[in-house]
Image (tube, grey):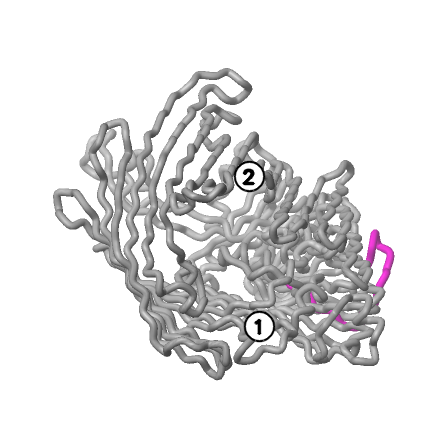
């Protein structure tokens, strides 16, 4: 027997009746979460033997779960029962139910077997489960087991990072699938779009929280097979997981063929390891690894290491050493670096490690995900601090800890160890840079009286300067000082300070034959000073583009500094840092600072920012009254910010006695709203024979192209340290980059493919 319900405009309103009559009673025992199914269609036919329902036209099946919300006040006539004895318009308070949709099924035709709990559907079949979406020509579904089989089907994951198609797709669980004769692409595609690239396979198993396992897989470009693999694994879950990242391939005139295949290991939500095996045909295998962890917002760490048993670093490779201008003799090449930030209670700690095998390593291995440039950017972005320049022979390793108190005092300690990678022959009479094992500083600034007046500050430091060979010392440096403002005028800022400094040395010569002084020395001197200045400020109206006002701040100032040292303390102390290099001072300094700010509105939002500054300063040495050159060089610093993301900086030192401008420094940085970048750094100093330039640019071209250029050149020696040219073509799902890198003795060419959500090189923009 069957009952036919003809199409009617009121048919959708029979929804509740159909749900509870034909579906909910059967499924209630199987649904521990009280979820139920609801159905609407243009035509619904009920069969009693066997119990089933056939729906035709705009069929919509939804699995919903109640969400209770108590305390709702509803009119009596809206409820399923009346409150006896009450007025017709009285109100009652009871539980009002809301629901959330767990599963949605749409089709042109659906047959539902109530007894078996199975559905057959065909025509524009669409299924959505927890964000995952499936479309198919037809399929059968077991709604109790959340499984099914679908013909000519497509699955798009919730975060749209994986698109799967197949002749037959089996849904084996809530979010797991088996695909026969299908393909996968790890990015979003438009409906009907041919994937620019894909991974095809005869058989695919997709596991929730795991991987997509592909058997007899091929990598395709526009459906054309390019590469074959009997087994391939791709990420198939919404969080990071263990697996291979996309490799990089290059060729070099010095290193030969180069292949790097990174492998990511997900240890936990807060820790991971990435392995970077990199094969050089002319050098051998370089092993690399990276470990990262995050404990909280202020506690994190990143550690990286590389090792290579270098076949080229052999005395017989004369051409290699000559062309690259290399000086190292070791064949074991390595670089260990890392940083950790850790807050322990109220103590702030920082650990930095930078250990390298030789002076040539950092400039020789500067390409790829573990090169110096990529590592410098990664650590700078993560910790706000990087490493010393790759040409610096002193690699610094530090452990620092700081505790501050609300009363204005602080305690700071650090260990400082130097990895000296120069090829010099150090000994007691020619020592390397001293270590600090340890250095401890207690400092503070407190008011002498609660109602204001002078402030008392101090800086007490103990440092153990250690050298295995050469002069070392234990040094105690004390600097108490009083600073106060002088109320000369409400229009003048005036301060004076005075203090004493006492430095005690306990010296170990460690076999240095040139040290002939006592093993203990003491230096005591007085320092005095003061400054007088004023601030002139004026606001101006403007109507120039987005700028409607600007302000100019002018601060002229003059000051005096005096440091008196006994005559018998000249050149009797070892020189470790700037404290030991202090000299007598008796001079006036004067200058003027200018600051300009602009105010306006950009794209409907108000702004105020720095626009420009100019600082000029000079010192007059009173000790040189009988000299013809008492005036120090004039120092000029200026900065200009014509755009929000454009910064231009310039500094020059000018000798007024004939040498003229002997120093120039230019810095420029620019970042456009669309992603163009520009950077320039030029340094010139005729007194120290420095004349170098470095710069880089990245420009977005039409038709999804972008080009980049970078240069590091020592102008004084006419030597190009590094020159790199890059050209990239980018599509929503992939990109390819060609690069050429020139260094002394080597020309490197690299082709890098990046596939969306498969992994990209560190320090480079993603999709």
Horizontal arrangement in the rendering, residue 282 relative to residue 210 (left or right): right
Choose between 689 and 367: the one closer to the eye: 689
Q: Tell me if residue 418 comes above or below residue 25 in the rendering.
A: below
Secondary structure, magenta segment, majority class: strand
Q: Splitting the image into 4 quarters, where does residue 700 fall?
A: top right
The label number, if any, that marks residue 226 in the structure image: none
Estimate the x, y position of residue 367 in percent, counting from the top left.
71, 61
Give the magenta-colored segment's residue range: 220-235
Q: Residue at x 45, y 38 (%)?
A: 617
Q: Residue at x 77, y 68 (%)?
A: 259
Choose between 464 and 25: the one closer to the eye: 464
Q: Was residue 394 drawn as part of the magenta stretch in this picture? A: no
The label number, if any, that marks residue 657 in the structure image: 2
The label number, if any, that marks residue 420 in the structure image: 1
Q: Which residue is drawn at 53% across and 49% down?
A: 62
Q: Was residue 225 drawn as part of the magenta stretch in this picture? A: yes
Q: How many marks?
A: 2
Q: Tell me if residue 424 comes above or below residue 25 in the rendering.
A: below
State which tag comes first along the sequence, 2 or 1: 1
């Amino acid at each position: 027997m069957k009952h036919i319900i003809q199409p009617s405009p009121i048919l959708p309103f029979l929804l509740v009746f159909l749900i509870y009559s034909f579906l909910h009673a059967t499924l209630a025992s199987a649904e521990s979460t009280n979820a139920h199914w609801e159905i609407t269609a243009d035509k619904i036919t009920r069969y009693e033997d066997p119990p089933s329902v056939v729906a035709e036209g705009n069929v919509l099946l939804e699995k919903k779960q109640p969400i209770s919300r108590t305390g709702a006040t509803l009119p009596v006539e809206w409820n399923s029962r009346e409150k006896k004895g009450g007025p017709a318009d009285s109100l009652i308070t009871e539980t009002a139910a809301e629901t959330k949709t767990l599963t949605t099924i749409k089709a042109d035709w659906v047959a539902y077997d109530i007894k078996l709990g199975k559905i057959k559907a065909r025509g524009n079949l669409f299924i959505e489960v927890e964000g995952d979406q499936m479309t198919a020509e037809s399929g059968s579904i077991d709604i109790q087991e959340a499984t099914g089989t679908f013909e000519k089907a497509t699955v798009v994951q919730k975060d749209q990072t994986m698109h799967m198609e197949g002749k037959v797709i089996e849904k084996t669980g809530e979010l797991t699938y088996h695909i026969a004769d299908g393909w996968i692409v790890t990015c979003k595609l438009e409906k009907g779009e041919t994937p620019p690239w894909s991974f095809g396979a005869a058989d695919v198993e997709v596991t929730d929280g795991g991987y997509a396992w592909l058997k007899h897989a091929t990598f395709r470009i526009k459906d054309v097979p390019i590469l074959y693999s009997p087994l391939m694994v791709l990420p198939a879950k919404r969080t990071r997981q263990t697996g291979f990242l996309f490799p990089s391939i290059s060729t070099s005139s010095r290193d030969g063929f180069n292949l790097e295949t990174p492998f990511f290991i997900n240890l936990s939500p807060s820790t991971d390891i990435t392995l970077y095996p990199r094969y050089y045909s002319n050098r051998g295998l370089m092993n690399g690894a990276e470990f990262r962890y995050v404990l909280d917002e202020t506690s994190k760490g990143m550690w990286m290491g590389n090792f290579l048993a270098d076949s080229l670093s052999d005395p017989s490779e004369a051409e290699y050493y000559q062309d690259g201008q290399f000086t190292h003799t070791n064949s074991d090449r390595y670089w260990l670096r890392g940083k950790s930030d850790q807050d322990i209670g109220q103590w702030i700690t920082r650990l930095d490690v930078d250990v390298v095998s030789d002076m040539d390593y950092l400039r020789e291995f500067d390409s790829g995900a573990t090169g110096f440039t990529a590592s410098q950017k990664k650590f700078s972005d993560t910790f706000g601090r990087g490493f010393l320049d790759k040409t610096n022979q002193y690699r610094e390793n530090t452990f620092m800890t700081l505790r501050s108190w609300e009363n204005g005092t602080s305690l700071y300690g650090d260990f400082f160890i130097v990895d000296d990678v120069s090829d010099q022959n150090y000994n007691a009479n020619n020592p390397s840079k001293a270590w600090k094992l340890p250095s401890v500083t207690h400092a503070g600034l407190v008011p002498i009286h609660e109602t204001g007046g002078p402030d008392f500050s101090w800086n007490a430091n103990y440092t153990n300067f250690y050298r295995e060979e050469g002069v070392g010392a234990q040094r105690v440096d004390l600097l108490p000082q009083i600073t106060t403002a002088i109320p000369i005028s409400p229009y003048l800022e005036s301060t004076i300070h005075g203090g004493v400094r006492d430095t005690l040395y306990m010296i170990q010569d460690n076999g240095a034959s040139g040290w002939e002084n006592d093993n203990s020395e003491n230096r005591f001197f007085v320092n005095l000073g003061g400054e007088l200045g004023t601030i002139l400020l004026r606001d101006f109206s403007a109507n120039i583009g987005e700028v409607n006002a600007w302000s100019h701040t002018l601060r002229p100032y003059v000051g005096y500094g005096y440091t008196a040292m006994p005559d018998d303390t000249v050149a009797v102390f070892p020189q470790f840092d700037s404290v030991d290099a202090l000299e007598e001072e008796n001079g006036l300094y004067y200058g003027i600072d200018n600051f300009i700010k602009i105010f306006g509105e950009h794209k409907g939002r108000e702004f105020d920012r720095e626009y420009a500054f100019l600082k000029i300063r000079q010192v007059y040495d009173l000790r040189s009254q009988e000299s013809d050159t008492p005036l120090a060089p004039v120092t000029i610093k200026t900065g200009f910010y014509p755009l929000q993301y454009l910064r231009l900086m310039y500094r020059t030192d000018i000798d007024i006695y004939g040498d003229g401008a002997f120093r120039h420094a230019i810095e420029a940085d620019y970042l456009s709203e669309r992603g163009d970048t520009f950077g320039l750094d030029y340094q010139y100093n005729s007194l120290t024979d420095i004349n170098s330039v470095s710069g880089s640019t990245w420009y977005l071209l039409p038709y999804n192209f972008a080009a980049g250029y970078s240069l590091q050149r020592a102008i004084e020696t006419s030597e190009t340290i590094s020159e790199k040219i890059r050209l990239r073509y980018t599509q929503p799902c992939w990109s390819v980059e060609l690069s050429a890198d020139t260094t002394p003795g080597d020309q490197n060419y690299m082709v890098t493919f990046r596939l969306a959500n498969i992994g990209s090189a560190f320090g480079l923009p993603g999709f």
